[in-house]
Amino acid sequence: MTTDTGSGKSAPALPPLFPFAAIAGQPELRLALLLAALDPRIGGVLVEGPRGTAKSTGARALAELLPEAPFVTLPLGATLEHLVGTLDLQQALAASAVRFAPGLLARAHGGVLYVDEINLLPDALVDVLLDAAASGVNVIERDGISHSHAARIVLVGTMNPEEGTLRPQLLDRLGLCVRLANVSDVALRQEIVRVRLAFDADPLALRARYADEQQRLSARLQAAMRRLGDASALSLSDAVLQTASGLCIAAQVDGMRADLVLLRAARAFAAWSEAESVLPEHVHAVSELVLAHRRKPGTAAAPKPAANEASPPPSSSASPSAESGAQDSDWGYLPAQSVPVQRNAQASPLLVGRKEEPATKKA
């Protein structure tokens, strides 16, 4: 297996990966990653927390559960063209054919795009990432020449709040947010360390121990995806809509994005829980993941219902873990391809699914 490091070349085969099912102590992280994988339209996951809290481990592990999913890392120094791809304008003008060199968004299609320290990226790159994560499409425009391709990605961004944060406008566009803390339970810390030491001593033996659980998780994830793909399944009742609206109003969020994300996350959670229908309890179960980074200061989280907590959270087997076992076989440079030309009414600079920025704003 190879993993795309974002350098344009495939990295050497990775050593055995820590299994998703073996991660313990971070149930919110596990749930958020599973929901984002079930419905990428949720808009990805922002993982905040100190070092050593399984942020990158969880992201890599998620890709292994998805069928033939690439795991692509966006380097901190990446440029806009590196991310979205490039168009050969000379070829377009001379031969009326667009030569498109795919970027990282194309390579990550169908898999996980991991961005470490997303808060340190230029806003323009974050903007492009969020557009692609929400729409599933990457659009490249240069001097009136347009090209688009599918970019259905699970965006996972991590950051340490001590090193700065994202602007509120960008935070709101990230679907889910998990705020991790250091594990303070002695017994749980011992178990986490014990499993990790066992993996370091014999990775293949530990993976074999969790192989059945990994297979069950992958099968369950794919079954939930199929349910979500059925438009007639898991419809949203008035009670569910009312619950979502009430929670968003109580959190004093801006706009309607939180309502939409909350409903998508609740539907994904119902599918994962193998429920017959989406219930208000499902909305409560995922509400903090959706509202934590959108809630106005001074507003408290709404208490969850005391009884009948709806579908149980993912079983302990659903623990995300660490390594991307994705079959990203040879996700290095893709060859340039000829694609039809589409000319816009007006020429515009390189933009990706965004409105044209004023000329004074840096890309």
Image (cartoon, rainbow, N blue to C red):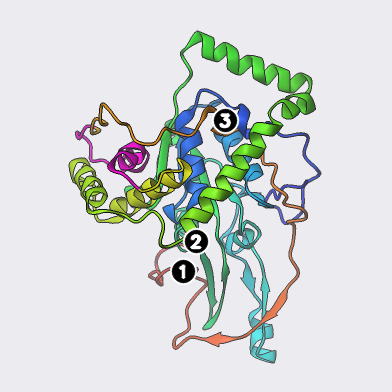
Residue at disc 1, secondary structure: loop
Residues 7 and 42: in front is 42
In the image, farthest residue toward the front = 276
Disc 3 to disc 1, how far (Cα)?
Answer: 38 Å
Disc number for residue 353: 1
Residue 45 picture location, percent across and down: 46, 44
> Residue at image x 22%, y 48%?
239
**Count the marks: how many?**
3
Kindly identify the amino acid type of the residue bearing the numbered disc 1: Gly
Disc number for residue 132: 2
> Residue at image x 62%, y 85%?
340
Residues 44 and 118: in front is 44
Residue at disc 3, secondary structure: helix
Disc 2 residue crowd, few under 14, some 14–19, many 20+, Cα 10 Å: many
Residues 112 and 271: in front is 271
Q: Which residues are magenta?
A: 278-300
Kindly identify the amino acid type of the residue bearing the numbered disc 3: Ser
Vertical side of 230 occupied by 116: above or below:
above
Disc 3 residue crowd, few under 14, some 14–19, many 20+, Cα 10 Å: some
Is 144 colored magenta in this rendering?
A: no
Vertical side of 108 occupied by 291: above or below:
above
Residue at disc 2, secondary structure: helix
Pointer 1 or 2: first along the chain? 2
Residue 6 picture location, percent across and down: 67, 52
Q: Report whether 172 appears left or right of 354.
A: left
